[in-house]
Image: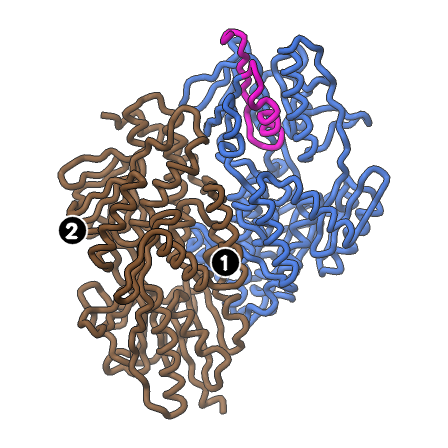
Chain colours: A brown, B blue
Amino acid sequence: MNQAVKRVVIIGGGFAGLNAAKALGNKHGVQVTLLDSRNHHLFQPLLYQVALAGLNPGDIAAPIRSILAPFQNITVLLAEATGFDLAGKRVLVKELDPVPFDYLIVASGSNHVYFGHEEWEQSAPGLKSIEQAREIRRRTLLAYEQAEMTEDPVERQRLLTFVIVGGGPTGVELAGAIAEMSRFTLAKDFRRIDPRQSRVVLIEGGPRLLPAFSHDLSANATNQLEKLGVRVQTECVVTGLDRHGVVACGERIPAGTVIWAAGVKASPLGALLGVPLDRQGRVLIEEDLSVEGHDYLFVLGDLAHFTGRDGNPLPGLAPVALQQGKKAARNILRDLAGQPRKPYRYIDKGMLATIGKNKAVGQFRSIHFTGFIAWLAWLFVHIYYLTGFANRLQVVFHWGWSYMTFKRGARLILGQDWRMFLLRGGEKREEAPK
Amino acid sequence: MNQAVKRVVIIGGGFAGLNAAKALGNKHGVQVTLLDSRNHHLFQPLLYQVALAGLNPGDIAAPIRSILAPFQNITVLLAEATGFDLAGKRVLVKELDPVPFDYLIVASGSNHVYFGHEEWEQSAPGLKSIEQAREIRRRTLLAYEQAEMTEDPVERQRLLTFVIVGGGPTGVELAGAIAEMSRFTLAKDFRRIDPRQSRVVLIEGGPRLLPAFSHDLSANATNQLEKLGVRVQTECVVTGLDRHGVVACGERIPAGTVIWAAGVKASPLGALLGVPLDRQGRVLIEEDLSVEGHDYLFVLGDLAHFTGRDGNPLPGLAPVALQQGKKAARNILRDLAGQPRKPYRYIDKGMLATIGKNKAVGQFRSIHFTGFIAWLAWLFVHIYYLTGFANRLQVVFHWGWSYMTFKRGARLILGQDWRMFLLRGGEKREEAPK
C-alpha cells in the first residue's frame, strides 16, 4: 500500500501553496511536504496596515506549521528550494538532501522589480514581507521624529514629504494611509511640527490610478485621495531616486521617505524549471494548471501565466492563487482516483482597493461602488479571508478601536539598526539641504 | 511670567520618567522635555511574553509621544543624552544642541551585565528591549525548526535544549513559558520531532530561585517548574558559554538556545553625573529623591540607590520606579509652590512571579499565595497597570484566547538576518556535534 502513496512537494506557503496543501490534507494516498524559506503564511493584502502601524505583524501572519498541524500527512520544512532535477523528480534544497516527489507544485510568488535600477531598493523599499513593512514603518515614523528635531525649515519640509511610486492598489492604500495618519493620528503628538502639513505624493507612470479597475473608479479613487490631501501625478515616470528624494517627470521632489509599489517580477525559481516563460518570467501553464509536457508539475499564483477568457494573463491577486491552489490539489486527487483532470476557470470575486476610513472603491462584474459601501465590503472581505479565527477577531478589535479613535496601536520604531538610521538622518542634514 | 516657568528635563521614558512627566503634565509653571533614545515606553514585566510569542510588541509598548500628547507643556524628543554640564545646567545630546534645564530627572534604567564576560552576550541574549525579545523568539522557534530538519539525534537533543541563566522572576517566567510552549503549544506542529521531549534547564548561582521572595515561595516555584519538566539547578555558576551550549557547575550542557537573565547594572549615564555611586553604579539619593548637594537633580528607578527602611537599597521593580517618578514630580511642584519637599516612602505593592497557566507565586507583606490564586492576581495586576486602554483590552483578548486554546498568536520568525542564522545553524551541525 505504501508504494501507492504519492509524494507531493509544494514550494511556497502563500495563498496558492497553502490552499493546495489544505486541499490535500488528510487525504488518502498522498504524502505532502511543503517547503518555505519563511515560517509564516502572510496575508499580503493587509501588509500595508503593518507598514503604517495599524496592525501588528502577528495579526496578519500565522505559522504555516500551525495552520497545517491538523493534517497528519503534511510535513512543513523551513527550507529554501535552490533548484530542480525534473528528470530525477527531485527538488534541490539548501543545506539539506534533495527532496523526491511524484507531483511538484511550485508557487513561490513574485518580488518587486526596479526596472533595471536595483540600486533604488535601498532608498525606496517595497512591500512584500513583514520585515519590509517594518522598515517602511520605521522610516515613516522616524521622518516625523527627525522633522520635530530639525531647525531647518527646508529640511523639515523634505522630511515631511512622502513619495509613493506606483498607482496600483498597494500604492493607493499606502498613500491614503499615510495621509490619514498625518491628518488624524499624529496631528496632536508633536509640538514643533504639524504633521498635517506633511505632503504625500503618489506617482503613477500610466495614465490613471488603479489601471485594473474601470475608468470611473480610477477617477473616484483619485478624487478621494485628493480630498485627503494626496497629490496624484499620473503619466509621470521616475528617472532618479536616492535618499534625498526622487526625480519624476523632470521635477526633483525632495522627500524623506520613498516607498516602491511600482512593479513585480516572478520569483527566480520559475526560470530554474527550464520550461517556457513569458516576458515577466512567469511560467506558461495549461488549462489544468500543469506545465505542458510535464503533467506532474503545477505552477500557480503570481509565478504562473494562465491565459484568462479575455486572452490576457490572470492578474496577481490572492483569489486567483487561492483558487488555483485548490484546483491543482483536486486535479492531483483526480489523477489518483483515475478520473480525468478538470480545467481551471477563474471565478471573479471582484476587486477592492481601500483609501482610508469610509473611503474605498470596488468593482464586482458590472457593479461599481465607492465610499463607505466599498469600504465596508473591503472590511468584510478581508476579515472573512484572514487565516485563523484568533487573528480575525483581533483585527476586528484593532480596527474597531482605530475606527472610533483614529489611533494606531502599533506605532513602534524598532530594529537593531535604528540608531544607525538616526545617525544617517543626522548626516543627511549636514550634506543635503539645498 | 515666562521667567517664572521652570524647565524640567527628564531622561528616560520608562516607569519613572513617564510617571514624572505625567505628574507634571498641564501643571502651571513647568515646561517639560522628555528625552529617550527609543520612541516607545515598554511594559517590561510582560516582555517575556513577546519573547515567547504570547503577545505582539504593540500589545506591551506604546509611543511615549502619544502617551504624553494630552499634555501641552511636554515636548518629547527621540534623542540620546550623552553627558551633563551640571554647572551650566545643560544636558548634552547627541547631534543636537545641549538642552538647558532648571530641574533634571535622570531615570535611564539598567542593562544586563555578564560579570566580565561581555562576549557571552552574542550567545546568550538578555531581555531588556523588544529587539532582544524578538531575537529570543527567533532563536527559540528556529531551534525547533532546525531540530525538525536534522538527522543527527545528538544534535537534535542539543537543539531542543534551552538553558536560562538566572533564577529571578524573569528567569523563572522564561523557563516556565518555554516548558509550556513545548508541552502544549508546539506539541502537534512537528512531524519528526516531539517538542515535548525538549529540555529546559534553569541555572541559578544562589541557593534558591526568586531570592527576593520568601523561602516557602522559592520552594513552591521550584516545585511548579519541575512539574512542567524544568530542571532547576541552584548553587550552580556558569563558567563557560558559547553557541554550542554552557558549562555550569563543572558540567557541559549542549544547548541550542541560551538566555541570560542573571544580572543588571545601572545605565552608564549615572557615572557621567559625577556624583557618588554605589558598587553597582547606582546613584546614591536622598529621602526626597534628589542627589545630595544638587537639589535640582533627581535620580530615579533602577538607576537610583534609595535606602529602604530595612537598610537595603530598594529593588529594581516597576512599582518603585513608578512611585518615585510621581514623588519627584510632586517635590518639584512643592518647590514652585514654596512648600517644603516630602520624603519618599516605598509603598510595598507585593511581588508576583508567574510560571505558567494557573501557576505563579505571590507575596504581599505576610500573605503568601501560590498556584491559581497567585496567577489570577498576577493577571489582574498586569492588565491593570498596562499603559493605554486599547492595549489592556487586547492583552485580555490574547490571553483569554491563549488560555482556552494554548495557542500563541505571535509565533513568527522575523528579522532580516534570519537566513544568516539558519546558515549558522547549518554550520553548527558540521562543526559542533560531540
Q: Please name which of the two marks, 2 or 1, marks the residue nearer to the observer.
A: 2
**Residue at 73% across, 51% down:** B375
- Circle 2 Cα neighbour tier, 10 Å, few/some/many (<14 / 14–19 / ≥20): few
Secondary structure beneath dot 2 equals loop
Front residue (pair A366, A87): A366
Q: What residue do we see at 41% from left, 41% from top? A: A138
Residue span colored magenta: B1-30
> Mark 2 to mark 1: distance in Å?
54 Å
Residue at image mark 1? B428
Across and down, in percent, residue A240 comes to 19, 41
The tag on residue A397 is none
Residue that lies at the very extreme toward the left in this rendered image: A250
Answer with left or right where residue B174 lies relative to residue B192: right
In x, y percent, where is residue B139?
53, 54
The answer for which chain carries disc 2 is A
Which amino acid lies under the numbered mark 2 shown in the image of this protein? Pro
Vertical arrangement, residue A62 with respect to residue A360, above or below: below
Residue A207, labelled with which disc? 2
Q: Position of residue B432 (x, y in %)?
A: 53, 59
Q: Is residue B203 above or below residue A81?
A: above
The residue positioned 48% from the left and 58% from the top of the image is B425
